[in-house]
Amino acid sequence: MEGKVPTIPLKKTRRKMSKTSLEKKEARDAWIMMSPAIIILLLIAVYPIIRTFWISLHEMVLTDPSSGYPFIGFENYVKIFNDQRAMDSIVFTLKFTVVTVFFELLLGFGAAMLMNKAFKGRGFVRASILVPWAIPTTVSALMWKFIYNDQYGLFNDILTRLHVIDSYQAWLSSSSGSFMALVITDVWKTAPFIALLTLAGLQMIPKELYESAKIDGANKFQIFLNITLPLVKYTVIVALLFRTLDAFRVFELITVMTGGANGTESLSVYAYNNLMKFLDFGYGSAMSMLIFAVVFLISLIYMKALGNKLTDF
Amino acid sequence: MKRGKMKKLLVTLILAIMMVSIIGCSGNTESSGEASNGEGNEKVTIRFSFDQGVGEPTQKIVDKYNESQDKVHVETVILPQDANVVHDDFVNKLASGDTSVDVMALDVVYVAEFAAAGWLEDLGQYFDQSTQSRYLPGTIEGATYNGKLVAFPWFTNASVLFYRQDIIDQLGVEVPTTYQGWMDLEEKIKDLDEIKYVSNFQAAKSEALVCNWVEYIWNNGGDVLDESGSPVVNTSNNVEATEIMLDLVENYSPEGITTYNEPESEQVFLDGKSLFIRDWSGFWNSANAEGSKVAGKVGATTLPIGPNGEEPHSALGGLDLVINKFIDDEHKEAAVDFLRYMASEETQKEMTLISAQPPVLKSVYEDADVLAEIPFYEKFYGIIEGGKSRPMSPKYAKVSDAIQRNIHQALSGETEVKTALDQLQSELEELNK
């Protein structure tokens, strides 16, 4: 509010005069106050990224110190695009991201619409829908791994009872089965996240808008299209942004459930293998930088879609 | 005026706290120093790092050592029970030449990697040949890299073929010693409702698969690397062995065997659904524990062999003790003394009794107290004696990864066995360059 006052020309001149003393001091104080935060941000966020980028320009295999870790420019990056395994993992990761985020949006949005209605036990439903989200990924991955078990799995039990399948299947032993199992598990775990954020967005829509729409004779579909959707859009995009970033970096789910077998190795899993298992820090860092770049790009695209709405939340 | 001062003070205070916490982060890498025992005699303090899995018994053993003498004091640094975390922790320390840890308990498969990187002290000068010959040959072999003893075995483990003694008795047959022999029982167990599968092992894409697969090829006269360290994967013996494994996966094992690690396979056996299971020695206890449907019905034998195999070999696991090469001579001397203690007959016996981890010293398997406590060891000695180490390669992580990928593809029917082994051979050749 205060910022709007100086638009009056008279005050503007006065402001210019005082800028030397008061405003300068304020600006300096602000920098001093922010400096701990900035220093910490530089140390824990910016420095590791620069450092990783620097390492990615070197041939650095920790078990081979005799190489002297020479500088090799962008060779590690070129290697990624000549490495079939890396390409496969990129394709898998993109496929996984698109499919999971799509289903999460569908289910999460649907659930939010339902929960937005007034009904008995609404509080209980809202709390219980959050349970999957609250369970650590590693734990839920282990749990689902057992659900897909070929001897004792609940999944097999339900499907045989419904006569969908004749005999128990080993779902995690084929490519298509593994992919499906991973998608179901991820959607189960993270659709509640989208539901919760969307619900928050839905509740911010003023009731008056719906009332006046009804008085104007709009049907339910029109209300949804013209009131609900435009007003909840930005909340949903923010939720999608988080989900896309998370899905693209999928790691624990895959390590626990398949270990990357049957063509389910994600880019993060492969990067981890290179870094921590093969101790190939140069190549692994290049892959990490690639993940960083893609994630950054995804964020930019979403930010663009949001315009300046992101800061309004 | 006063407020301005307060503000400045506050800012300075916050800044100071920030700085302290930043410096504090790097303050934990204190090198092991000297500790006084209170009587003025200087004790050398060494730090011993190992994982939580054997935390309690090891702490007891270390405490006993500390009480027993006045020159060396051992501090323990306990890591989480996760082979990867332990590996990463040691790598981070050693790669930077850190001396905060003197003795480490290292998984046997990483010995070659650490030795090749030049991180391990040569122990050949402290433990002569006659000393070495008192330990299980497979474990000494696994602690030797390029002809040098770079680690000393601490405890070991080997796989065992556990089978249903009651079913074998019921069928009135001898315990088979070949894969074919076990497959032939398929016909006979069909009439028994209870047993659904002949075979059961671990074929998920993991380290367990590597252990299983090398056993198939060893037991059919093959190997992964020859004596000079060059890969010899796509030999006819190995192809035959892998085909036997595939046959077992497709026709004699649970449907999901290519997703099984130890827990999943054990569940099937404990439920009485499979005739045999290949598992680590510790499973003997779980199989006979309360709640197991097969308690008291389990027999143990060596792994089967293939048509070209001569004698059965089990894959060895376990931990070796290694000394950080970067520490000074005084600490090295203390570390060697501690290693001698850990390898001694008394400690080996004590550790076996309180931890139930198989010892590496041969004589412990004949010890009356040990046999009274763990009668299974009488049978087990015959199995672990033939134990072999997984391929010793400085790039073991990559070797293991290549085996896991290619063999898992062959077992899940995505690739022909021969093609998979050719691919594995060329990948290993590439690594050897």
Image: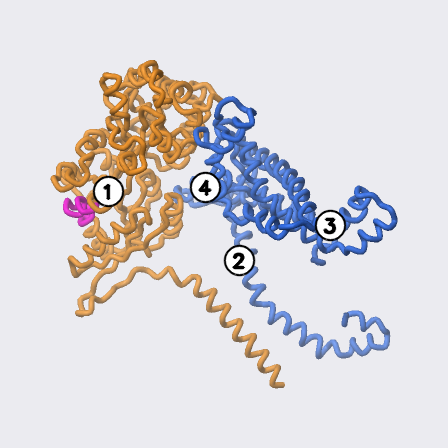
Chain letter, colour orange in render: B
CA–CA distance between discs 4 and 1? 37 Å
**Secondary structure category for the residue under label 1:** loop
Residue with the mark numbered 1: B356
**Viewed as shown, does residue B119 lie left or right of B123?**
right
Residue at figure coordinates x 33%, y 48% from the top left: B51
What kind of residue is marked 1? Ala
Q: Give the answer, above or below, for where A226 lies relative to A260.
A: below
Residue at figure coordinates x 51%, y 42% from the top left: A251
Co-location on one chain, circles 2 and 4? yes
CA–CA distance between discs 3 and 2? 34 Å
Query: Does residue B366 show up?
Result: yes
**Where residue B149 appears, x then y in whole percent?**
24, 40
Q: Please report, as a chain letter, where disc 3 is located.
A: A
Chain letter, colour blue in render: A
Residue with the mark numbered 3: A232
Q: Please report, as a chain letter, where disc 2 is located.
A: A
Dot placed on the residue nearer the N-terminal end, 3 or 2: 2
